[in-house]
Amino acid sequence: MKDKVKKVMIADVKTALEIYSKYGELSNNEIKILYNNNAKSTVARLMREAKAQMKKDGKISSRSYLVDTESAYKAWNIDVKRLERLFNMQKRLGFTTEGGTTDE
């Protein structure tokens, strides 16, 4: 039987893409921004998931409190190519201004 884990939603497409492109490794702060969630338990669970994926991917981080961005996104099922398509669609439809969402 699978554990029931609450799915956490990313803050928005633009934020997810910015974090992915800016940071090779993520700290708690970037995770809080990515998910717009300050709950320590949620951030800790996401970090554990990312570290487990890093181990599978054979990657190590430069600091114990950081996780590899690619492994983290993989662990959290964040599809960067899909996000890029969504972001481009939002731009075409006029839902974004200067690279950001209009509802910010």
Image (tube, rainbow, N blue to C red):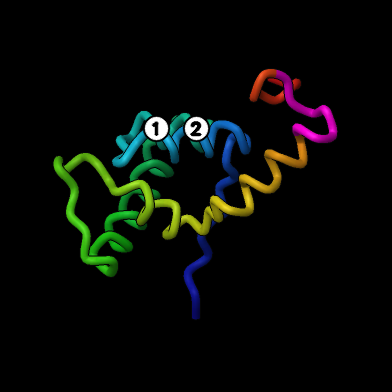
Q: In front here: 13 or 49?
A: 13
Residue under label 1, please give it: 22
Q: Is disc 2 surrounded by few (<14), some (14 to 19) or many (20+) residues within 10 Å?
A: few
Q: Quadrant of residue 13?
A: top right
Q: Which mark is residue 98?
A: none
Residue 66: percent from the left, percent from the top? Answer: 24, 41
Tell me which residue sits at (28%, 69%) in the image: 56
Tell me which residue sits at (53%, 38%) in the image: 16
The image quadrant where one finds the C terminus is top right
Q: Is residue 48 left or right of residue 89?
A: left
Q: Is residue 96 magenta?
A: yes
Residue under label 2, please give it: 18
Amino acid at the residue labelled 2: Glu
Q: Is residue 83 left or right of residue 52?
A: right
Residue 10: percent from the left, percent from the top? Answer: 57, 41
Cβ–Cβ under 8 Å for marks 1 and 2 = yes
Q: Is residue 12 magenta?
A: no
Asked if residue 39 can be seen in this view, the reply is: no
Q: Please tell me whether residue 76 is drawn above or below residue 104 in the rendered image.
A: below
Q: In front here: 48 or 66?
A: 66
Amino acid at the residue labelled 1: Lys
Q: CA distance from mark 1 to mark 2?
A: 6 Å
Residue 61: percent from the left, percent from the top? Answer: 19, 48
Q: Is residue 3 left or right of residue 43?
A: right
Q: Please tell me whether residue 31 is drawn above or below residue 94 in the rendered image.
A: below
Q: How many marks?
A: 2
Magenta range: 91-97
- Secondary element under disc 1, as helix, strand or loop, is helix
